[in-house]
Amino acid sequence: MKGKVVIITGGSSGIGLAMAHEFGRLGAFVVISARNKERLDIALSDLQWQGFDVMAVKADVSIEADCKNLIDKAVEAKGRIDILVNNAGVSMRAAFKNTDLAVLKTLMDINFWGTVYCTKYALPHLLETRGSVVGIISIAGYIGLPGRTGYSASKFAIRGFLETLRCENLRTGLHVLVAAPGFTTSNIRKSALQANGSPQGETPRDEAKMMSSEKAAQKIVSAILKRKNELVLTFLEGKFAVMLNHYFPSLVNYLVFNQMAKEPDSPI
């Protein structure tokens, strides 16, 4: 990774920040971005304190101009891009019947369109370096999760977009990875939107039983370096659930509904 340039959206916390640490340790030049400048500055200071070669660019990925600026700044700094990690995202927790449609639009704008915008402007540079485009989705991109219609829809859309991009570039050398963490300790649940669009605050799930962001980041970085096409993390709520859904979708619907219904203050 020496001399390579890595861009990570949503890089100020959770899996994004953990990936910045991983790539920093490998010697890459890391560009992190996030909407919240205060959190972004804290993350930048932390990474610099450890001696990593890093730059921060404030960007709201739901805004096309911000995505273009992010890519332009990275190219201005080092003249190339080798890896783009589309990690920025927001979740939700509300039954569709009660949800303001603006919530679903927000999720699509950030999760799906943020991935599309950043990938569009980074693609010419990635084709030059035969680099990697990475989309961080979720098990919700394989299985519809009740109470998370907008989240699942956006993650399914990202998977469809990136799988098609991979097929289009079979002869160009572009690498495309779709990575799906299971339930992971991350800020995304605390900022998950409720039916009226306000953040839910404390997560109702037991974070202690989840994979850590650091562990997820290690596995995702390893998959990028090995140029894998797909990565599904965790066994029972990840690989096994996706496999079972392929063969027994009705059973999985039943199991997923029952599990989600048991959450404290479940919206379903």
Image (cartoon, rainbow, N blue to C red):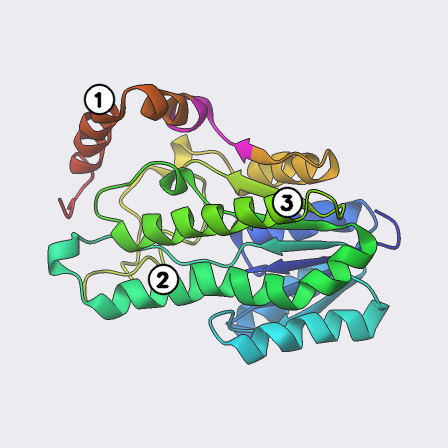
**Label 3 packing within 10 angstroms: few (<14), some (14-19), many (20+):** many
Mark 1 or mark 3, earlier in chain: 3
Location of mark 2 (residue): 107
Q: Secondary structure at mark 1?
A: helix
Location of mark 3 (residue): 176
Location of mark 1 (residue): 251
Q: Secondary structure at mark 2?
A: helix
Indicate whether 48 appears above or below 162: below
Q: Judge whether residue 21 can be spotted in this image.
A: yes
Horizontally, residue 178 falls left or right of residue 157, namely right
The answer to whether marks 2 and 3 mark residues whose Cβ atoms lie closer than 8 Å is no
Q: Nearer the viewer, mark 2 or mark 3?
A: 3
Residue at point 21%, 36% (across, down) = 260
Q: Position of residue 29 (x, y in %)?
A: 80, 58
Indicate whether 101 appears above or below 192: below
Identify the magenta region.
231-239
What kind of residue is marked 3? Answer: Val
Whether residue 30 is in magenta: the answer is no
Indicate whether 174 appears above or below 228: below
Residue at point 16%, 52% (across, down) = 95
Residue at point 57%, 77% (across, down) = 66
**Label 1 packing within 10 angstroms: few (<14), some (14-19), many (20+):** few
The answer to whether marks 1 and 3 mark residues whose Cβ atoms lie closer than 8 Å is no
Horizontally, residue 73 falls left or right of residue 165, namely right
Mark 2 or mark 3, earlier in chain: 2
What kind of residue is marked 2? Answer: Leu
Q: Position of residue 79 (x, y in %)?
A: 85, 68
Residue at point 47%, 27% (across, down) = 234
Q: Judge whether residue 42 can be spotted in this image.
A: no
